[in-house]
Image (cartoon, helix red, strand yellow):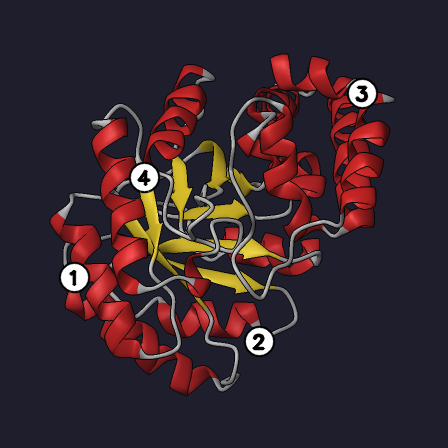
Amino acid sequence: MRIFTGAWPALATPITEHGEINVPVLRETVEYLVDKQVDGLYIGGTTGEGIFMSLDSRQLVAETVSDQVNSRIPIIIHVGSIPVDDVITLAKHADYIKADGISSVVTPYYKNVDSLYHYYEQVGSSVPEMPLLAYMFGGTVNAVSLMQKLMKIPTLAGAKYSGADMFEFRQLVELREENWTIFSGMDEQCLFAAMSGAHGNVGSTLNFMPGVYREIRKSAEEGNYHYGIQLQNRANKITRIMQSYGFESSIKPVMHKIGFDFGKPCLPNLPLPEKDLHGLYNELDKTDFLELVQM
């Protein structure tokens, strides 16, 4: 089974003023990120707002990205949803367009390991040739116990772990040595995750400054931790500014700042009020934001 590595943007999704997928901007963004030498794209996750979209819109995003990428880099499609029938529909569509893998978030209403196992087992068996990565938020469920159970699923290829517990994260890395991908989903912990054995990182701020994270991972691999900390702190300053205005509402304005019209976020995410938008841009201008974007 394929191992996925490196720096992967959790791809944001541009929306037109009429609430439709902005296909031209989506294609431009994909091309920009491929030119930036990202290692793969994670599509339709939290940053991509897939959970807030119709099945048709999610499939259109997946098809557009797959077509634009044209096998130059791997793509993983997030297929998570509440009804398992929708998840299976999206998984089969991902298989049809020849995505390289699928991922699904832990369903929010169920924290029982046995019930979650059956959920993932149904998803995995629906596309028996497709690598499956669990998508976990730290604290929602015992990630280690769940992954130990999920390892019975033949297509399980690893997990995307978006949690702050590095002890739990390391245990996930150690569950299997071969054919195993553990992505860190916390941009602000990229260096520490790499030092703990992460195979790659999937994150929101990689939409506009992926080169920083590539360099952070390189510094960890080379043992140049002092430089890695410097880069991580610089990137984290941008993340903190975005968090202060509401991270989910700040992603698209930041993409607009670098030249991509991403429109408004999908409900229930809300656009930034005008005064906050000016505040966000003003604070970013006081940092080395543009230098980080150009890396």
In the rendered image, residue 50, in percent from the top left (x then y), is placed at: 42, 57
Residue placed under numbered mark 2 in the picture: 141
In this rendering, position of residue 132 left or right of residue 238: left
Task: Locate residue 272 relative to residue 196 in the image: left or right.
Answer: right
Cα distance, mark 4 to mark 1?
16 Å
Quote the CA–CA distance across marks 2 and 1.
25 Å
> Residue 75: which disc?
4
Q: Quadrant of the C terminus?
A: top right
- The label shown at residue 152 is none
Left of 19 or right of it: where is 216? right
In the displayed structure, 229 sits above or below 42; it is above
Q: Position of residue 51 (x, y in %)?
A: 44, 64
Amino acid carrying label 3: it is His
Q: Secondary structure at mark 3?
A: helix
Q: Residue at x 61, y 52 (%)?
A: 170
Q: Are marks 3 and 2 in contact (CB under 8 Å)?
A: no
Task: Identify the amino acid type marked 2.
Answer: Val
Lower sequence index among marks 3 and 1: 1
**What residue is shown with label 1?**
127
